[in-house]
Image: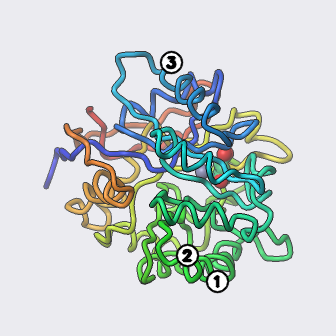
């Protein structure tokens, strides 16, 4: 039995580091495990331009301190009024790595998101031309569609025509949760990939209602039924270069979660690699963990692989009930691997 696993330093291709006091509290957890991360731009106000992204990147670096070797990869939040020239200039200058499409009102701080993808024609043509990835929160916002169906309906109604209209547009479908999304990404004759979170691999929608209402298991896209969890697990451990690690770590203070209208988001950064590793071990796929965590994402983005390694050892580690003002994913549970650095 393997008791130590050493892999190339991994990256997190989807994380919310927030701002202000929360940024101070959480950034170190991501930087401890990952060399780089794609930083989500859904601040208030959202990160929509070059100057805002540079200033946010500076705040992230300042929160971590000079000695920490971590590269924040910034994203541009798309709105109905996004400026294609500014986006292209930001990409050329090395400020923006990708653009993020939130359908308006799909999730936390998405009120300024895109009301109709047809408004993005110039932006999408530009991204396709310059090879800049489009990262998508793939849920329709039509409130008449059942919340558990919003991702599958998005794949059918929005993603399918999008890939037809922009055949060379690099797309990352973020935090996939359904068999439909996994199949689309695996099979499409298109440059498309998907990130997968630890929560969508480890728990299903029963966790939200386990003996009572469990706000700390609530995220968006919402957890789905077991058949979907199993399909997403198969995709993650398949070895396909189209699937890679993106935690979607999304901290909210405990009071904002345990509320009459609790915020969506699961804070999984402190034990992210340990949580993913549980899945790969259960699926007898430890040999595929490095590809998922450290190679597939960089290759899809066209970025170099990291130098250096990290090691995980087989040792029990119990996730604390609280980390600062936030309840972490798997609080109180014991995991079988420990990140050593
Ligand atoms: O659960 C989520 N939380 N899903 C998102 O799409 C946004 C995120 C957040 O920012 O809290
Ligand atoms: Zn997210």
Residue 1: image location, x then y, percent: 13, 55
Q: Secondary structure at mark 1?
A: helix
* Quarter residue 59 falls in: top right
Q: Which residue is mark 2?
A: 166
Whether residue 251 is visible, yes or no, is yes
Residue pictured at 65% horizontal, 23% vertical: 20
Q: CA distance from mark 1 to mark 3?
A: 42 Å
Q: Is residue 223 above or below residue 20?
A: below
Question: Is the residue marked 1 within 8 Å of ligand 1, measured from its CB?
Answer: no
Observer-nearest of 126 and 77: 126
Q: Earlier in the sequence, mark 2 or mark 1?
A: 1
Image quadrant of residue 225?
Answer: bottom right
Residue placed under numbered mark 1 in the picture: 156
Is 134 on the left or on the right of 244, as rendered? right
Q: Quadrant of the C terminus?
A: top left
Which residue position holds label 3? 62
- The answer to whether the residues at label 1 and label 3 have Cβ atoms under 8 Å apart is no
Q: Secondary structure at mark 2?
A: loop
The answer to whether 137 is drawn above or below residue 183 in the figure is above
Q: Nearer the viewer, residue 209 or 52?
A: 52
Front disc: 2 or 3 = 2
Q: Residue 16, image x and y in percent?
A: 58, 41
Residue 33: % across, % down: 36, 36
What residue is rendered at 48% in x and 47% in y?
97
Q: Which mark is residue 337?
A: none
- Asked whether residue 206 appears in the rendered view, the answer is no
Q: Which circle's residue, 1 or 3, is located before the other in the chain? A: 3
- The one nearer the camera, 174 or 114, is 114
256 relative position to 127: left or right: right
């Amino acid at each position: 039995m393997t008791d130590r696993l050493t892999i190339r330093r991994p990256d997190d291709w989807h994380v919310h580091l927030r701002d202000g006091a929360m940024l101070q509290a959480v950034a170190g957890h991501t930087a401890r495990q990952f060399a780089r991360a794609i930083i989500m731009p859904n601040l208030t106000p959202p990160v929509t331009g070059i100057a805002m992204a540079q200033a946010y990147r500076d705040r992230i670096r300042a929160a971590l301190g000079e000695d920490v070797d971590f590269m924040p990869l910034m994203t541009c939040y798309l709105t109905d009024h996004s400026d294609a020239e500014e986006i292209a200039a930001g990409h050329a200058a090395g400020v923006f790595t990708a653009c993020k499409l939130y359908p308006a009102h799909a999730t936390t701080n998405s009120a300024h998101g895109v009301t109709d993808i047809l408004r993005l024609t110039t932006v999408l043509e530009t991204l396709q031309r310059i090879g800049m990835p489009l990262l998508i929160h793939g849920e329709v916002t039509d409130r008449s569609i059942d919340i558990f169906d919003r991702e599958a309906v998005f794949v059918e109604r929005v993603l399918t025509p999008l890939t037809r209209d922009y055949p060379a547009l690099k797309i990352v479908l973020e935090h996939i949760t359904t068999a439909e999304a996994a199949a689309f990404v695996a099979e499409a004759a298109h440059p498309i990939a998907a990130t997968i979170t630890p929560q969508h691999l480890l728990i299903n929608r029963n966790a939200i209602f386990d003996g009572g209402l469990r706000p700390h298991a609530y995220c968006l896209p919402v957890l789905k039924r077991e058949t979907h969890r199993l399909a997403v697990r198969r995709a993650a451990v398949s070895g396909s270069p189209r699937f890679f690690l993106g935690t979607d770590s999304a901290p909210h203070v405990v009071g904002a979660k345990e509320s009459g209208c609790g915020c969506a988001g699961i804070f999984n950064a402190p034990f992210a690699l340990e949580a993913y590793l549980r899945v790969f071990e259960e699926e007898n796929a430890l040999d595929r963990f490095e590809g998922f965590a450290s190679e597939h994402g960089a290759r899809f983005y066209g970025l170099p692989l990291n130098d250096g390694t990290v090691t995980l050892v087989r040792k029990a580690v119990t996730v604390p009930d609280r980390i600062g003002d936030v309840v972490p994913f798997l609080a109180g549970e014991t995991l079988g691997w420990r990140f050593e650095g």
